[in-house]
Amino acid sequence: MVVKKPRIVIVGAGVAGLTAANKLYTTQGSSELFELCVVEGGTRIGGRINTSEFGGDRIEMGATWIHGIGGSPIHKIAQEINSLDSDQPWERMDGFLDDPLTVAEGGYELNPSLVKPVTNFFNKLMEFAQGKVIEDGLSKEEIGHFKLASKGFDFISRIGDPGKLSIGAFLRQGLQTFWDSLEGQEELKGYGGNWSRKSLQEAIFTIQENIQRTYTSAGDLMTLDFNAESEYRMFPDEEITIAKGYMSIIEFIASVLPPGSIQLCRKVTKIEWQPENYRVLESETGDFRPVKLHFSDGSVMLADHVIVTVSLGVLKARICEGSGFFDPPLPHFKTEAISRLGYGLVNKLFLQLSPTHDRESDDLNKFPFLQMAFQRSDSEFRHPKIPWWMRRTASLSPIYGKSRVLLGWFAGKEALALESLDDEEIVTGVSTTISSFLSSSHHKVNSNSHELSNGKVSSVDSSNGGELKFSKVLKTQWGTDPLFLGSYSYVAVGSSGEDLDTMAVPLPKNCSNGSCSSPPLQILFAGEATHRTHYSTTHGAYFSGLREANRLLQHYHCNGV
C-alpha cells in the first residue's frame, strides 16, 4: 500500500509564504515527507515586494527598507547574495536625504535653527512612546519641555479610557506643552501676516506627523494605539535600501523550490475546513484531506494543511463582505482580532523631471530634498490651487542626489485619492505645489530674527510656468489592488498586541495537542500582521513564515530550527 504524504498548500507567494516553503523544503528529510505547493493569485511572486525601474533608476514599488541591519535576517541574506552593492543607481543610495531643505508655503525657507528643535522634540516624543530612554542628547530646556509634555499626557491617561489612548493625542499634547513652556516668546513678523512663530512650529511638527503616517500606515495618528507602540521592535543600527533590489531577496528564497511548486494566477475563492464536530465531506476522488481550496477557474485542491499568508486587508474584506471565503466562517476570536487591528495604505509617487534645454550644468538642474510646511486647513493664506491630496505630503525629493526621478510618499485618504488621478492631474497638482514652495523670489526665516530676510531656495525655477516639466509619472496602487487592498498593518486604538498573537493562532484551535476530534493544523496563518513585535515589516513576514513552517515540522517530528 502506498502511504499518502501530507500535502501542504501555501496561499500567497510573498516573503512569508516563500519563506515557509523554503524552510519546509530545505529541512533535512522533509522534501521526501511532504507534498508542497505555493498558490499565488497574481502574475508574479513577491507580494508587497516589487522592484522595478523608472527613468533609468532602480526603484521599489513596495517594501523599501531594511529596518535596522543589526540582526536582521533580510540584511544577512542581502549580504550573502551580494545584493547591497550595484553599478546601477538605486533608491536612497547616498546621504543626500539626510540634509533636507524645509520651506513654508509661499516660498519661505526655514533656517535649521528653527526646524531642528521642533523636529528633535517630536522624535523624542516618539522615542518615549516606544519605551526608550529619551534624555540623552537633549538640552536642559528640551528636557524640561519633554517632561512637561509627558506629565500632561499622564493626566490624560488617568482621566481617559486606557484602551483609547492614541499616538496622535499624545503628540498633540506634547506640542501644546511645548508652546505653554514658551509662553511670552516674541513672534516673528510674518511676510504679509502669513506666518507666526507658533504656526511655523506647528507646520514643522505636522511634517513629522505626516512622515510618521507613512512609517506606520495609520492614515490618522489618532487611530494609532499608544500603549502598543512600546511593543514594536526595530533592529539596531542604520536603515538601508538594497542596491540590487528587494526582489533579489525574494528570488533567492524561492530559488531552492523545485519547478512547478509555485503556481501563478491561482486565485483562491474559498477554503473549506473541518472544525470540531463539523460534518466531514467525502472528496470526489476518495482521497480525503480535511481542507479543500476552491479557485477562481473552478478547480479545487485538497490539502492536509494550508498556510494562509494573504494580507490583513484581504482578510478584513472577506469578513465584511460575508463572501464565505472560509467555510465554515472563522471563529469569533479570530474575526474580532482581524476587525480590531488597523491596516493602512501608503503609496509612492515617482515623477521623472525633464531636463531643461537652456541649462547644461547638472548642478544647476539639481532638485533639493524639499520638506514642505503647509498652512493649516483653516488658514486664509493657503494657496488656493494646491490640491488637497498634496497637503499632507511631507516631502518631494530625488531618490538620490543626482537623480531626475522625484519621489513623494502618500498615506491614508490622500494615498487612495492618488490612485484614481490621471497623469495630467498629478503633474498639474505637483507642479503647482512646487511652484508655491520653490519660486524664484522668496524669503528666508531665521529662528533668532524678527524679520524675514531675502535668500535663495533652489536653482530649480518653476515660476515661469514652463520650465519645470515632468516626462513620466508612475504611482503605486496598493489600495485598489484586490490581492492586497492596502499596504501594512498597525495596532489601532481599541486593539492590542494580543490581537496580533491571535492572528497567528492555527485552526482548529487547541487541536495540535490531540484534545479535539478534528485533524490538527488545518489552517495556519502567516504574514507581517501575525507578528507581535515586528508587524508591518518584511522581516516580520519572514519570521512568521519560519514560525508556521516550524510548527508543521515539529508536528511531524522533523528537525526544524
Image (tube, rainbow, N blue to C red):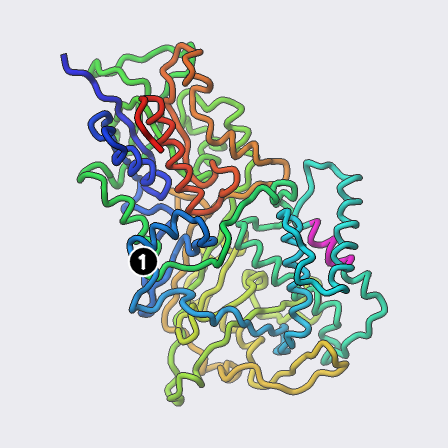
Q: Is residue 16 left or right of residue 238?
A: left
* Residue 386 is covered by the magenta coloring: no
List the single residue furthest toward the left. Answer: 1
> As displayed, is residue 73 above or below residue 302?
below
Q: Is residue 428 visible?
A: no
At label 1, which amino acid type do we have?
Ser
Which x, y percent locates residue 468?
45, 79
Which x, y percent locates residue 309?
38, 36
Q: Nearer the viewer, residue 351 or 144?
A: 144
List the single residue furthest toward the right. Answer: 184
Quarter of the image with the C terminus in it: top left
Q: Residues within 10 Å of mark 1 (few under 14, many from 20)?
A: some
> As displayed, is residue 25 above or below residue 534?
above
What's the magenta bit mostly, secondary-structure-wise?
Answer: helix
> As displayed, is residue 83 above or below residue 511?
below
Q: Residue at x 33, y 58 (%)?
A: 245
Q: Residue at x 34, y 67 (%)?
A: 57
Residue 277 image-quadrant placement = top left
Residue 444 image-quadrant placement = bottom right
Which x, y percent locates residue 366?
45, 80
The magenta span reads: 169-177
Q: Residue at x 23, y 25 (%)?
A: 33
Q: Which residue in the protein does label 1 denote?
A: 83
Quarter of the image with the N terminus in it: top left
User: SS class of the residue under badge 1?
Assistant: loop
Which x, y percent locates residue 192?
73, 80
Q: Is residue 140 left or right of residue 61?
A: right
Q: Is residue 338 left or right of residue 30?
A: right
Q: Nearer the viewer, residue 131 or 498?
A: 131
Q: Nearer the viewer, residue 315 or 86?
A: 86
Total number of numbered labels?
1
